[in-house]
Amino acid sequence: MSEENRNLGDIFRRLIDNTGPISLAQFMGESNARYYADRDPFGLAGDFITAPEISQMFGELVGLWLADMWINAGRRQPVLYVELGPGRGTLAKDALRSARQYGLEPEVHLVETSVALRDIQEEAIPQAIWHDDLSTIPKGGPILLVANEFFDALPLRQLVRTDKGWRERMVGLERDKFVFVAGGQPMDTAVPAEWRDAPHGTLLETCPAASAILYEIAGRLADQGGAALIVDYGSEELNAGSTLQAVRAHRKVDPFAAPGKADLTAHVDFATLARIALAREIRHLGTVTQGKWLRALGIETRAQALTRRAPHYAEEIGRALDRLVSDDQMGALFKVMGLAAPNWPDGAGFEED
């Protein structure tokens, strides 16, 4: 039996038995790589539903925002639409259709490693060019980049304050079950100075993979020009506590229960991402709640227009609107971060109250 077809949990158990506890980042990274490799996890028949699958309004407003930025920046050509983790291609399809009404018809570049999802994306956006990572994206012309529910699935590290100082939280075994254990390597230097003397038991999360990708995005914006939208659930400041979760069949499950068969995610630390952007001397337009951003771009007016056009779908449109913008749904937990090149304009939806 090939390594790819073997039970990932058994592979982890053998590895831990032979070499000791593994990092949570390794556990999460390999689990999600296996999970996304050969399946379509989106929609009612899958494990979860993302904003673009809830309503076309989401993607349309993303396209409108990108077109507005591009027009106000002088309509530079060539221009590239870049999306990280584009799912089924629904967001790209809706955004590009909306942007086309304002003259924006960019080259389309999708960063996707799943062969199964690439096949689905090709049906939705046949003109797209696919990449395994950002390194092969062309360097000519500004980029208009979108990452919706991409950063939350990147491998996470957890640090815990013990009586011996800060240690990385590792994954070990106890009677053949995966359990968290504290590693032996001191990690105090990886902890922000203001947290170093936190009480014993304090847990912090960090995501080096997210930092590295944001660093590369910011470098592209600085060198090529352009703008970016990062949409995900998370916090505008670093908070203590674990946010690791697993979802399968639209329900939260034990993250250790079935490695490679559930989507492992964690809250995005938008404060750290903003600091990295500013360190690369690009513009952080703001980080606001998804509900505020969508309302500022006119989602309620768009919902009314769709209802007038298709009154028999009025109830469905209303439910979708509520799910996207209400504080007790996605509206408050999900954040929208706007980034732009130094000489690019302000973006709609990020104005201070």
Image (cartoon, rainbow, N blue to C red):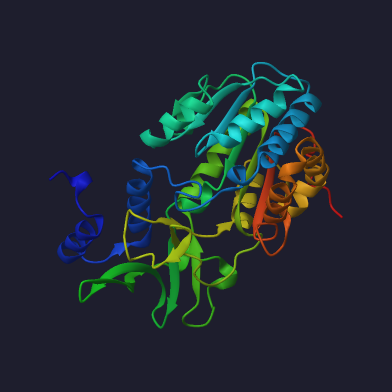
Pinpoint residue 7: horizontal percent, then vertical percent.
22, 55
Q: With respect to residue 141, does 182 lie above or below? A: below
Give 169 or 114, whichever is nearer the viewer. 114
- Answer with left or right where residue 101 lies relative to residue 175: right
Residue 93, by quadrant, is top right
Measuring 74% from the left and 28% from the top, which residue is drawn there? Answer: 67
Residue lying furthest left in this view? 1
Q: Position of residue 332 (x, y in %)?
A: 69, 60
Q: Tell me if 237 is positioned left or right of 126 in this view.
A: right
* Residue furthest to the front: 312
Work out whether residue 254 or residue 240 is closer to the camera in this orientation and state it. Answer: 254
- Asked whether residue 222 appears in the rendered view, the answer is no
Q: Is residue 235 above or below residue 133?
A: below
- Taking depth in this image into account, of 307 and 113 the one nearest to the observer is 307
Q: Residue furthest top?
A: 77
Task: Pinpoint residue 222: horizontal percent, then vertical percent.
Answer: 64, 32
The residue located at (53%, 25%) in the rendering is: 125
Give the number of callouts: 0
2 or 241, nearer to the observer: 2
Up/down of 21 relative to 99, above or below: below
Residue name at image x 78 percent, y 21 percent: 74
Depicted 168 relative to depicted 115: above or below: below
**228 displayed left or right of 216:** right
- Is residue 77 in view from this perspective? yes
Tell me the quadrant of the picture where the N terminus can be found: top left
Q: Quadrant of residue 267?
A: bottom right
Q: Quadrant of the C terminus?
A: bottom right
At which x and y percent is residue 287? 71, 52
